[in-house]
Structures are given as structure tokens and as C-alpha cells.
Image (tube, rainbow, N blue to C red):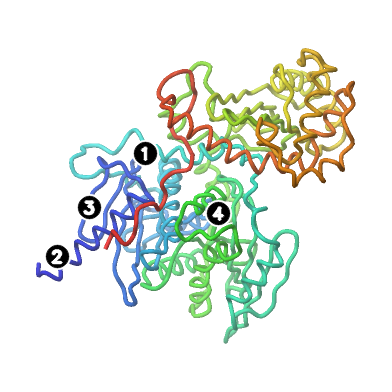
Amino acid sequence: MDESGDEELTQRRDWVRYFCDGFLWPDADWLQDDERGFSYWPGRLGQHVAVDEIAGGHLKWRWRMPVVQGITRRDLAAWMCLRLNEFACGWSFVVDPANATLSAIAAVSAPIDWDRYLLRFANGAKLAGWFCDTIVDDLARVLGGTPAFSAPGGHDEPRVVPDALAYLPTAIRERPEWVFDPVPYRFGSLDDMARLFVGRMGDAADRSEVDDGGFTITTLRPDGEHAASVLRAAFDVHRLLGSAWRTDVVLPLVPGGVHASAASVGAWRLYDDPVSSLLGAWVSDGDALVYRQWATTDELRSYEQLQSFGGHTADLLWSITSTSSDALAWAMDADWEAVSGAPAPGDIDATLGTVIGPLGQGGRALTEIWRPHEDAADRRLLWWQQLAVLIVVGWFNPMGPTLSTLELRRDPTTGRVRLLWLMRHPFLPQYVDLGPCETDDELDEALRDGMDRLCQGNLPNVVSLAPCPGDLAERVHRAFQDAAADHVWDPGEGFAETAARIRDTLGQPWAYAGGQRDDRFDARISERPPIRDDAGFVEWLDIAVDELNFAANMSTFPDAWDGSLNFQRSAGTLDGGPFDLGPFLLTYSSIGRSEPDAAG
């Protein structure tokens, strides 16, 4: 190889090192370099990353994970990709007709210092590694293929114990933001965001509409027979990963109906094109073909650590959404062909249910590799389908902020509705199945048990009682009042003292926890009536559920949660001891701290 070739290889390795050290954090024993990039095995399936320099100083990063090989049900495979893409977050499922392999793929085309795109690229790889390893056995069976298990040189067998990042989705579900995520409220109004998006789209934007759920921008009608495409954007809930920013490019009319071949062609086009990015996936939505991108609010919090972070502005959301324009450009130029012979929708739904079933039980890695020990939190309960949150109570304590809920959830093995008590605590979480609650007697018994666990000796400083149908709200309220009175050592003094303390520090959780009050809040505090010395449950609850009190505490909980964990980590007290920390701590990290300039 000549000197220019050596220099190019060295530079490529520097780029890879910057990406791995700053964004991916792979286990070195399961990492294998090659001339174009590297391969990594977070579990039994290998991920292959290639990086190429293109004109204008840009880099094209391509990521591919073969999942099922030797597929015999090719008619079903492409349609399963379209449905599995509903769960994707930063990648796309596709079928390669040349080798009958179903793969997960993603791509980024950007300068090396565009850290936001590299973060999105890395997050997609981490989440896809967990998701694909969880479903691969069942997916291979229904498609008549075999799992694409592999291992790097030096390993005789595929990896058994997965990368710690396999537990990332469970760690996200453990955090207080899963109950109420404050991140969407740190951005501007929907009207402001819509105006910025329209301005950034320039001549492509035709008109925009804003409603409570987000905003819609209609693009100019392209030449030809297709109807105008639509850009939709809103904060929504991802089925597996919670609160997230969702953007859709909607193609209202596709000749012959929505079909999987068009989605696959479009994904491969974005993957192969050197100037396009593929950070989303094509899904079906009614009669429309939709290119959907997700950015979880966990990812949005990670942006705060990047050098490019300039605050929670609409510009940040635009940068996440902007790669949708690549899909829009392809859709306008695509040569649409109607495809027939699709499996019946009912057959696809039944097959999909078989494949994603393990997700409802916590996933393969969680149930087979990391089993809850005695007296530890059973984190599989976090994955039961959430039907309703009946009550939220919180204790703002910088050394261990705690958020507890009573929730109606569905047991994935029996289909029965049960009541769960979920105590989210950074060191000592507890998740308990309180039993079935499909009859009045079952519900009352489960509520009594749950309220006893909620009220353990001291009153919370924040409460939220969710709206409930029928007389359920009254029953929850009554059970909570009975338990609170039973568990406060001196009900009169306890209710009055806690209520007065909440009122006097209203909107200032850190002041409640022992810090100094901020005089700017005095006017808001004076608007609330004083707490009587003989205040009881009603007066205390009234101030505990105050809108300002709830919003201030919930917005501060994530920082307090991370701060408590990082303090204990810096003190060296997280190794061993009585803490039930689980296999992965989701705290602020060193994302993107490696300098791109140093990477060449």
C-alpha cells in the first residue's frame, strides 16, 4: 500500500476510534477491526460498520446487522420487516433478495464533527442489538430460516452474556421519567416549532397546521400522479422506549396500496446513496406508506452533553428531523410499481404477535441471563403492558429520590389485569405484583395492600391522582386516605407540618430538601392559602397535588436521580453492599467527550 493509502487507513481508524470511544463503548474482546471500519458483537448477532470519506469532507457511515439467513418464506419476510419497523428506533429492517437474509440497517452521511448524528447512529445500534437478539429465534422460525449467529476471530461460539447495553431499555423504564417525562416541556410551543420547520423547508413547504398533538406541514405537490407528501412531527410514546420525538414523512397515495417492496427499495436506496442518511424506517399507517423516525427523550437528554448542544430549542428537534428529507426526496422520484400477493393482514398480525411475544416478558437477555434474586426488584414486571396509572407519589430526596406508582397492567402470560406497585428508587427499587383486580373484591384487596406499601411512615411531598372511570377514582382516593392516616405517626402534626413545608417551598424541590428558598417564588407561594396548624389529610393532599408542586418536582427528579447515583459512584460505594442496582446504570456519561479534531 502506498503512503496515501496508509494515511487514509490511519485516518479511518482514528474516525472509528472517536466513534467507539465517544458514542458506542463496545467491549474490546468482542470488537474486530477491518480496513473499512469494524465489526462488533453486543450479543449473538454481529454488527458491521463501514465508513467512507465522500466529497465535501463528509463521511458515510453504514451499519448492518444480519438477523435471519436462508429465508424460505420470502413472501412473508418483506411484510414482516414493514411491521417490525413499527418497533424500530434508529434503524430499518430489510430483506436482501440476493442472499435471502433479513437484516437491520442504518446509515449517516455527515461531517465527522456532527456529533448529533453520530449519537443517533450509535443509539440505533445499541437498541437494535437488544431488540434483534430478543426476537431472532422466533423470527427465524416463522420465516423458515436460521439465526445469523456469529462471533469474531478468537471465539469458538457466539456470545452468551450480552453487552451491558442490552439492558438499556429496561434501565430507561426504571427511571422516574417513564411516569412523567419533563423533556418535551423544555421546548418551545408547537406554533414556534412549526414556524421554524416551515422556514427550514423553504420552497418545499406548502402550508402548515398545528394542533394539540403536534404539527403537520404539507409539501409542494410533486410532478406526476402522486399526492403531496406530508411531514408530521410531535412528541409521542414509543411502544417500547417511552416518551420520544416522532417525525413522519407520509405518502398519502401509493399506487397499488402500501406494499413492502417499496419500503425495502427505499431503505436500501438511502443506505447505499453516499449523501443520504437512513435513521428511520418505513411503516404502514392505514393506506399510507410512512417514513418514521424516533428520538427517545433519553437520547434528547444525552444531547445536553454534546459540544453542539445549544439548549432545548426547536433547532435541536429540526436537526433530528432533517434527515427525513432524504426519504422525501426518494419518494418523489420513486418508480412505483403495484405489488400483489401479500399475506392476509390477519396472518401477518398473528405472526408478528409470535415474534414480539418475548418483549412483554422482559426480553431474552433479561429472563435468561439476569434473573432477579431474592428480595430484589423483579424488573420483568416493568415490561407488562401498562393500562392505567392510578396514583403517583414522590419523595424528593437528593440522596435517593423515590417515585412510586400503583398501576393496572396486563400479565402477558395469562392476559389478566393485575395491580402492580412500582417503586422507582436509584439504589433500592421494588416492583411487586399485588394480584388480580378484575372484580371489586380483588381490586379492594389489592388497593389496600398497595396503599400500605405506598405510605411507609412518612408522607410524600408530591402526589398525582390520575383520572379514573366510574367510581374507581373515589375508591383509590379513599384507600389512599385510610392508608396515609394509618402510617403517619401523628396524623395531625404530620399532615400539617408536611403541608406547610410544601407550601413554603412551592415550586422549589431543592429548597424543600433543605436548600435556600428562591425569592422569585414568593409571589406564587403567597397565592396559596396558609396551612392551618390542625391541617388534616384534605389540606395536605390539596397542596401535594398542586400543579406547580407536581411540575417542579417531576422536572427536577431526573437531575436528582443522576446526582444521587453519580455521588455514590464517586464515593466508591456502588460496588457490592446492599444496593440493588441491576446490571446497567443509566446516568450521565461521557457521550461525545472525545474530541473529533484529535481523530484526524
Q: How far apart are labels 4 and 3 at the CA level? A: 32 Å
Mark closer to the observer (2, 4) = 2
How would you rate the neighbour count of disc 1 (Cα within 10 Å): few for under 14, some for 14-19, many for 20 or more?
A: many
Say what amino acid the circle numbered 3 marks: Asp
Q: How far apart are labels 4 and 1 at the CA level? A: 24 Å
Q: How far apart are labels 2 and 3 at the CA level? A: 15 Å
On the picture, is 496 further left or further right than 75?
Answer: right
Which element carries disc 1, helix, strand or loop?
Answer: loop
Which tag, 4 or 3, sits closer to the chain's start?
3
Q: How far apart are labels 1 and 3 at the CA level? A: 18 Å
- Provide residue 348's location: percent of width, then percent of height: 55, 52
What residue is disc 4 on?
86
Which element carries disc 2, helix, strand or loop?
Answer: helix
Q: How far apart are labels 2 and 1 at the CA level? A: 32 Å
Q: Quadrant of the C terminus?
A: bottom left
Residue 33, disc = 3
Say what amino acid the circle numbered 1 marks: Asp
- Provide residue 475's location: percent of width, then percent of height: 84, 27
Q: Are dots 2 and 1 in contact, CB under 8 Å? A: no
What residue is disc 2 on?
6
Between residues 149 and 46, which one lies in front from this camera angle? 46
Say what amino acid the circle numbered 2 marks: Asp
